Every structure is written in C-alpha cells, then in structure tokens.
Image (tube, rainbow, N blue to C red):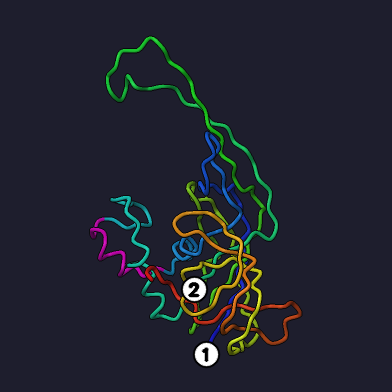
Amino acid sequence: MTIIYRCQLELHDSLYFATREIGRLYETEPVLHNYALCYALGLVDSEVYSTTVSEEHSYRYFCPEQIPKYEEHLTPLNRQGIYVTPARAVNYATVLNTWKYANNNYHVEMEKTQKNIPSFGRAKEIAPESQFEFFVISQKLINFPKWIRLGKWASKAELTVEELPKAKRHQLAEFTVSYPLNPLDVMFTHQVLSYDTVNMPPVSLIRNVRIRGEFYTCEGLKEDFKLPALMQYRFRG
C-alpha cells in the first residue's frame, strides 16, 4: 500500500539559509531541500545518529564535526519505504536584513592596529507567514509533528498534513511535474527530458520538469496531480 501525504508548512519566523552568495548578499531561495526536510521532520533514525556521534551528543543539539553524512543518514529511509520531496513556495514574501561587524584581527591574531573598520552584509530571508508545500510517499502510516524547525536560525514552522485519496501507479508515460525534484533521485528510473535548475547546495534541484517514466495519481483530485514513482535517495551513479 502506497500512501501519499500532502504537507503544508507555514513559517512563524523568518527563514534563512544561504542558497547563493552574491558579494555581501546572502540569499535564501524559496525552495526547501528534501534532505533538510527529512531531518526537520525527525525521520532520520536515531540509531543511525548513534553510530556517527558519541553517546554524549546528538545532532539535534550538538554537531561535533562539520562533515555531512547524507548517504549514511538517509539511505535507511529507502528500506523503510519513505521518500520526502523538496518543497515549493505556495505563497511567500522576503525581508532584507543588514548586519554589521568590526575588524577584529587584534583579537584573533594579536595584531596591533590603529584602525577599526566596520564591515557589513545583507541576508535576504523568507518572511513569516510564507507557505510551502511538499509530499511524503510512504509504505506505512507516519505520525508527523505539528511544529518543526528549519534553516540556520532554527526557524519555527507549523506543519499541516493531509493524506491524499488512494494513490494509483501508472506505467511508462511522458508527463510534466509542477513540483521541484531532486535529480539524483529520479534520473536512474526516469528519462528527464527538460527542466529548469535551482542552484542550491548540497545537490541542485530541478523544477518545471518534463519526464518519462512511471508515476502516481490520486483518485478524486480536481487538480492535475502527477508525482514520479520509484523515487529513492541516491548519492552515486
């Protein structure tokens, strides 16, 4: 049995992560990566964490090293039959914050200096009350949290989940996906014909995708809903 959940996120804080850096401007793209959503939803198995950090620490509160381990953490979701898509913005606004700091070489390197030159930067963030949408495809029932945290500032977001009507799987056909996708997760099971790229780490996403392969629809929906089947977390060719 395949269950498809439609998930809606509403921000209660401004959301910041550096999708791109343009000089002193750090911009947040209104797209949420599916890797980040897996962690935010609490779907990454705590037992996997225990093999990568000491018993005294948990990634939920403390990260002893700045080395991402996406493959190690997300591959178990394939065995559980759970897949989270990236999220698109349904309704959003942005805010621009300016921050300033002073030259502190004399603190870091004990250098003598006669100048204290201030510098600045700008962060373009997604504003509170912005809304995002994504999907979770699962082979079992999932209990979702009502509140999650996202981004560099652990911004608070409210999660609303709807279980879609019975999912139906269709055989090979060409179709268009109006939701962002992770290309690594579809390129080995589908033929990707055309797309637009969303440049963002750690893996750039694609949207407005024309694709050929198996897909899901849901009975009774008025909208033209098609979601690729067979999506899994993949990290190598």
> In the rendered view, would you say 191 is above or below 27?
below
Towards the viewer: 173 or 222: 173
Quarter of the image for residue 227 reads bottom right
Towards the viewer: 134 or 177: 177
**Mark-to-mark CA distance, 1 and 2:** 24 Å
Q: Residue 206, position in %: x, y?
A: 57, 63
User: In this view, which residue lies farthest toward the front?
Assistant: 193
User: In this view, which residue lies farthest toward the right?
Assistant: 222
108 displayed left or right of 216: left
Q: Tell us which disc is closer to us: 1 or 2.
A: 2
Q: Residue 42, position in %: x, y?
A: 44, 66
Q: Which residue is mark 2?
A: 187
Towards the viewer: 229 or 124: 229
> In the rendered view, would you say 140 is above or below 186?
below
Q: Which residues are magenta?
A: 44-56
Q: Amino acid at mark 1?
A: Met
| First in residue order: circle 1 vs circle 2 | 1
Q: Which circle marks residue 71 in the picture? A: none
Q: Which residue is mark 1?
A: 1
223 displayed left or right of 194: right
Give the quarter of the figure containing the C terminus: bottom left
Q: Residue 52, position in %: x, y?
A: 26, 62
